[in-house]
Amino acid sequence: MLCSNPECRQHTVGSHESKDKSTSIGIGAHIEAASQGGARYNANQSAAERSSFDNAIWLCSICATLIDKDEKKFPVALLQKWKTDVDNESADRLKVRTVAAAVPKSVTSKPSLAERAAANKAMREKELTRNAFLRTPEALDAARSQVERIITK
């Protein structure tokens, strides 16, 4: 998976010394903050909306920190555009690699944009689900604090 920031596009998951593990530097960040006082907090948002996939964006650990340090430079509309753009890009890449490799060209039909977006959304939801630290705002804040400590060393 790639960082959603179009100026970054860092790979966020890679190999690990242990064959049964992977290394991830990706973070599922909130577009609108999960808690009051957070970057881009929206008091009109319900708890369900705050924790929904639609309010999440996948970023490398550096970009996840940056968007919360300078919320005026990274407003909601910009982050939503990044998410839409990377979802479309991923869907296009996924379609080219998986459909072409798995199905003979004679029976391949192009998936619709909605089908590609749904496949990409499912892939991103699966990745977000694997990261247990995203389940609570407190745990996400703790993870961000860890990243900040690493970056400032």
Image (spheres, rainbow, N blue to C red):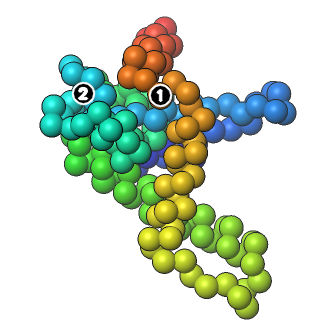
Report, in whole angstroms, how far the alpha carbon at label 1 lies from the one at label 2.
18 Å
Please tell me which residue is depicted at 47% across the width and 28% down the height of the picture.
135
Towards the viewer: 63 or 87: 87
Towards the viewer: 42 or 66: 42
User: Residue 37 bears which disc, if any?
Assistant: none
In the image, residue 9 sits, relative to residue 29, either above or below, namely below
Please tell me which residue is depicted at 67% across the width and 84% down the height of the picture.
108
Asked whether, in this view, residue 81 is left or right of residue 125, the answer is left
SS for callout 1? helix
Q: Which residue is mark 2?
A: 39
The answer to whether residue 12 is visible is no
In the image, residue 66 sits, relative to residue 49, either above or below, namely above
In the image, residue 53 sits, relative to residue 113, either above or below, namely above
Which-is-in-front pick, marks 1 and 2? 1
Please tell me which residue is depicted at 30% across the width and 54% down the height of the picture.
81
Which amino acid type corresponds to the residue marked 2 in the rendered image? Ala
The answer to whether residue 93 is visible is yes
Q: Give how far across and how far down residue 47 sits, in percent.
A: 29, 33
Asked whether, in this view, residue 135 is left or right of residue 20, the answer is left
Q: Which residue is mark 1?
A: 135
Within-10-Å neighbours for mark 1: few <14, some 14–19, many 20+: few
Which amino acid type corresponds to the residue marked 1 in the rendered image? Arg
Please tell me which residue is depicted at 71% across the width and 88% down the height of the picture.
107
Can you name the residue that lies furthest to the right here?
Answer: 19
Q: Give how far across and how far down residue 52 sits, in percent.
A: 38, 42
Within-10-Å neighbours for mark 2: few <14, some 14–19, many 20+: many
Asked whether, in this view, residue 21 is left or right of residue 95, the answer is right
